[in-house]
Image (spheres, helix red, strand yellow):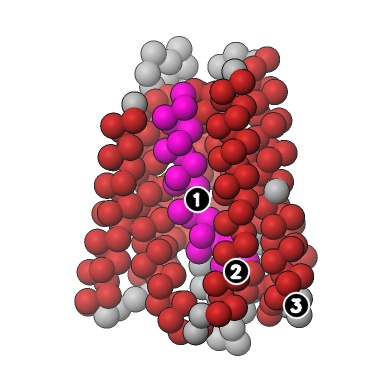
């Protein structure tokens, strides 16, 4: 169990550090940043879909005593992520804010992002409770998704009037809620049996929602044939990376 704690806390801390990636947005040309994010979003979508369908869903059906319930838990995860977006105005937007692309107020974003990171911590911890290879695969999928997400969050805070330094600090503090989520899950998961498989099913639904409802619609905005082909390649590459991680198991 000690090994699981070390892997989990280390993973969520690394994911939290991604919140500081807004530093890149300071030095990069905004147009160049938008172009790069478009392909990173495609790669992240592929990794989330690959994580859900190649790792998470097969794992929960292995020797499960609740196989008839698990598909409903996956759907519940999908629906709950939709509800969270509606209630908390939490947008998984991956395009930096501008006059043509406004974002919600900074406080709403920090609250929503803090809750989002709390769930990320729970997701990662729940995966490690099942197995270390599954935890690593889940961490990579979350990490790849967080890179464009955190750049977008940084843009929201700066657009809302925060200094760049203050935006980085608040974004990082919001990201640290993932550690709280991880610790809660590790404590509860070690006490309550069968919580892991339900959390993994919930995670699969969330991954599918984020990829299908937030990331792929961003990809569809690109109409240039060459860029669209590169997007598809990045999407398939993301799925391929998740498939290669099967070698860890």
| Percent x, y of residue 92 | 55, 61
Q: How far apart are marks 1 and 2 (CA)?
A: 15 Å
| Percent x, y of residue 114 | 70, 52
Q: Mark 3 points at which residue?
A: 163
Q: Could you tell which of marks 1 and 2 lies nearer the N-terminus?
A: 2
Q: Could you tell which of marks 3 and 1 lies nearer the N-terminus?
A: 1
| Percent x, y of residue 124 | 55, 36
Q: In this view, does 28 lie to the left or right of 91?
A: left
Q: Classify the position of the N terminus by image quarter.
A: top right
Magenta stretch: helix, strand or loop mostly:
helix
Quarter assignment of residue 227: bottom left
Disc 2 crowd rating (10 Å Cα; few below 14, some 14-19, many 20+) is many
Image disc number at residue 143: 1
Residue name at image x 39 percent, y 13 percent: 63
User: Is residue 85 something that shows in the picture?
Assistant: no
Q: Could you tell which of marks 2 and 3 lies nearer the N-terminus?
A: 2
Quarter assignment of residue 71: top left
| Percent x, y of residue 156 | 66, 73
Q: Is residue 125 left or right of residue 214?
A: right
Q: Give the range drawn in magenta.
A: 131-153
Image disc number at residue 22: 2
Say whether residue 113 is magenta: no
């Amino acid at each position: 169990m000690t090994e699981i704690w070390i892997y989990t806390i280390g993973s969520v801390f690394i994911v939290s550090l991604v919140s500081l990636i807004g530093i890149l947005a300071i030095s990069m040309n905004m147009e160049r940043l938008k172009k790069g994010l478009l392909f990173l979003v495609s790669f992240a979508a592929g990794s989330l879909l690959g994580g859900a369908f190649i790792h998470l869903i097969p794992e929960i059906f292995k020797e499960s005593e609740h196989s008839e319930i698990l598909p409903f838990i996956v759907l519940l995860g999908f629906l709950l992520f939709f509800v969270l977006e509606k209630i908390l105005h939490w947008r998984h937007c991956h395009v930096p804010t501008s006059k043509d692309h406004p974002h919600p107020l900074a406080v709403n974003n920090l609250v929503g992002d803090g809750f989002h990171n709390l769930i990320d911590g729970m997701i990662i911890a729940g995966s490690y409770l099942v197995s270390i290879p599954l935890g690593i695969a889940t961490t990579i999928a979350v990490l790849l998704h967080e890179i464009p997400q955190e750049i977008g969050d940084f843009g929201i805070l700066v657009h809302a009037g925060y200094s760049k330094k203050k935006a980085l600090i608040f974004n990082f503090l919001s990201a640290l809620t993932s550690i709280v989520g991880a610790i809660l899950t590790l404590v509860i998961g070690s006490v309550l049996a069968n919580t892991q498989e339900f959390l993994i099913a919930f995670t699969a639904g969330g991954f599918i929602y984020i990829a299908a409802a937030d990331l792929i619609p961003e990809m569809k905005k690109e109409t240039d044939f060459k860029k669209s082909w590169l997007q598809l390649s990045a999407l398939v590459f993301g799925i391929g990376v998740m498939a290669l991680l099967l070698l860890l198991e």
